Image: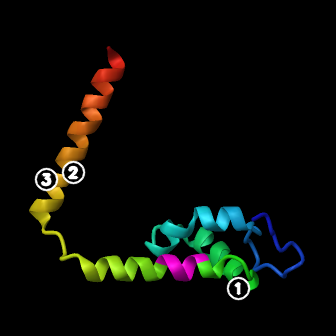
Amino acid sequence: MTNSHQDDAALPGLAHIDCETTIRRLWDYLDGRLPEIARAEVEEHLATCVHCPPHFVFARSMQVALAASAPPATDSEEDRLRERVRAALRRLADDEAR
């Protein structure tokens, strides 16, 4: 996964990214959490690469299937989950401090 497509014409200001970088950005891209430049770099790579788009198609399909299979979490459920994660992280930190 090191195809960098250096011969392809880039949009001004965008860096060419390789397949590995593109795949590392997959979930943030799908979740809409990439900065605008990084998102554009991923989109440019996907437009020129034959290897990466299937990964994104699969991941998007998985997101849709998971979203359809679970009822939406309520705010109180999310709050309880966050507190459980925080408590687990505190326990880990306490264990490491000993």
Which amino acid, by three-letter code, is at mark 1? Answer: Ala
Q: Looking at the image, is mark 1 or mark 3 earlier in the sequence?
A: 1
Which amino acid, by three-letter code, is at mark 2? Answer: Arg
**Label pair 3/2, CB-CB below 8 angstroms:** yes
**Label pair 1/3, CB-CB below 8 angstroms:** no
Check the image and name the residue furthest to the right. 7
Question: For the residue labelled by badge 2, is the local secondary structure a helix, a strand or a loop?
Answer: helix
Question: For the residue labelled by badge 1, is the local secondary structure a helix, a strand or a loop?
Answer: helix
Residue position for label 1: 47
**Label pair 1/2, CB-CB below 8 angstroms:** no
Residue 37, position as x, y percentages in the image: 62, 70
Q: Looking at the image, is mark 1 or mark 2 earlier in the sequence?
A: 1
Q: In which quarter of the image is residue 91?
A: top left
Residue beneath the point at 86% across and 72% down = 6
Q: In which quarter of the image is residue 8?
A: bottom right
Label at residue 3: none
Q: Which of 22 and 95 is in front in this view?
A: 95
Residue position for label 3: 80
Residue position for label 2: 82
